[in-house]
Amino acid sequence: MLPVSEVEKIILDLVKPFDPEIDSEILPLSQAIARILAEDISSELDFPHWDNSAMDGYALCYADLENLQELKLAISSDEIPAGITIDQSLNQGECVRIFTGGMLPIGADTIVMQEDAERIDNYLYLKAKPTQGEYVRRKGEFIQAGTTLIKAGTKLGATEIGALASARCQKIKVYRQPKIAIISTGNELVSLDSFHSLQLGQIIDSNLYALSTLVTQAGAIAIPFGTVRDHPVELESVMRQAITSADLIISSGGVSVGDYDYIEEILEKIGTDIHVRSVAIKPGKPLTVASLKPFLNVNRSEDNILYFGVPGNPVSAMMSFWRFIRGAIAKLNGSHKTHWYPQFIKAITTEDLHSQGRRETYLWGSLTYQKGSPIFQPAQNYSSGNLISAIGTNALAVMRVNQTYVPEGDEVIIMLT
Ligand code: AMP
Ligand code: MG
């Protein structure tokens, strides 16, 4: 049984990140939402492209205000709204009406907000002397042409997509989404699509749905490989199929030490390297991590493919994903440079927390904010077979080995899900 931190390291060392040349695709910007940039993007333009006003007001030349008895300027008959090109210069001692986004005329270097001045007939009376350069957005002030706008590995959210649009990037190179095979094993499992009524002793294969959701949320593509019986020959055939079509495989069930737990046996038969067999974590102790040399027709030909055999208990299966697999996916698709998983914060627990202290223990619950401070409300039940108890979970309180008690009102480490 290996410690959590050691298992995390073993897994991350096994992941070979996607190659930006091979494992990438070019997408129109509108289809790149939440994808990971595969190359640095530099701006072809200066931002802003030209000096312009940040306010509705008046453009003036600061030097014209020197030696004035009274802060009074003549107002030019022109007006500069956004969207027009202006090639006239400002006459000495004059100011010109300008609107937000309007181009500064030659000679102007300062904007006075309309609220800071009074217009009487064709004269502007300034309430106070402005600072030179005030409310001017200078050409190249945000970014200069040729400099990096967004780095490879960045996940494209609203800010990035908007910035790429303003930089006229219509097509961008992103990493392809990792393909993740999901296999469920167990004689008791029945597919949700089955027409038969559930017999006593049978349960629906819910892990397929929960794990597929986690995979999709992680920006990867879940490929269901069905519900397989605890039958070595059938299982081996499905595992081999999964290996030839996915970048990473997650199977749930069959990794404990029971008589019907065949996953490790088959992985050994196939000839994989098994790196982890169990972890000092609760829930989620049985975890098999293996790396496979790919078989025929595998798209990532030279690389190892990672196999995760997670426990069948529904909360344990999700725990393995949250704690270990999520980070592996982030390293695979290049996003770990900007988004590290899992993420930890500190919060105050609303109730006493208990652990036996033998394994690193994760207690699920919900994280909310009260008066701006993070508060952790633990669930009422911690059976790893009870998925219902985990409904609404967005965080887990982490109790280290030998930490058996955290009293209500104390701070606790929280892992975000
Ligand atoms: P196992 O890891 O195979 O020993 O299974 C542990 C527990 O998880 C058993 O109670 C199984 O019935 C349950 N289980 C296994 N696979 C699934 C699944 N795909 N969906 C829901 N529960 C499962
Ligand atoms: Mg089983």
Image: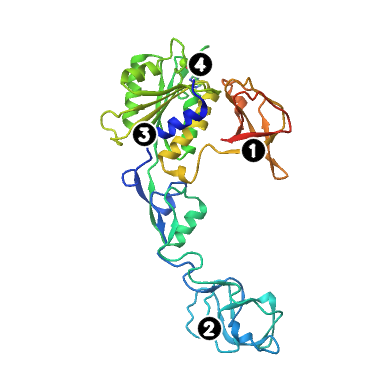
The residue sitting at the top extreme is 259
Please tell me whether mark 3 or mark 2 is closer to you in this view: 2
Please tell me which residue is depicted at 41% across the width and 34% down the height of the picture: 13
Amino acid type, mark 3: Asp
Amino acid type, mark 2: Gly
**For numbered disc 2, what is the local secondary structure?**
loop
The residue sitting at the left extreme is 296
Q: Are marks 1 and 2 in contact (CB under 8 Å)?
A: no
Q: Are marks 4 and 3 in contact (CB under 8 Å)?
A: no
Q: Residues within 10 Å of mark 4 (few under 14, many from 20)?
A: few
The residue that mark 2 highlights is 107
Indicate which disc, 4 or 3, sits on the residue closer to the N terminus.
4
Please tell me whether mark 1 or mark 4 is closer to you in this view: 1
Q: CA distance from mark 4 to mark 3?
A: 34 Å
Where is residue 379? Give x, y as percent.
66, 27
Quadrant in the picture for the C terminus? top right
**What mark, if any, has residue 28 been given in the picture?**
none
Label 1 beta carbon within 8 A of ligand 1: no
Indicate which disc, 3 or 1, sits on the residue closer to the N terminus.
3
Where is residue 27? Give x, y as percent.
38, 51
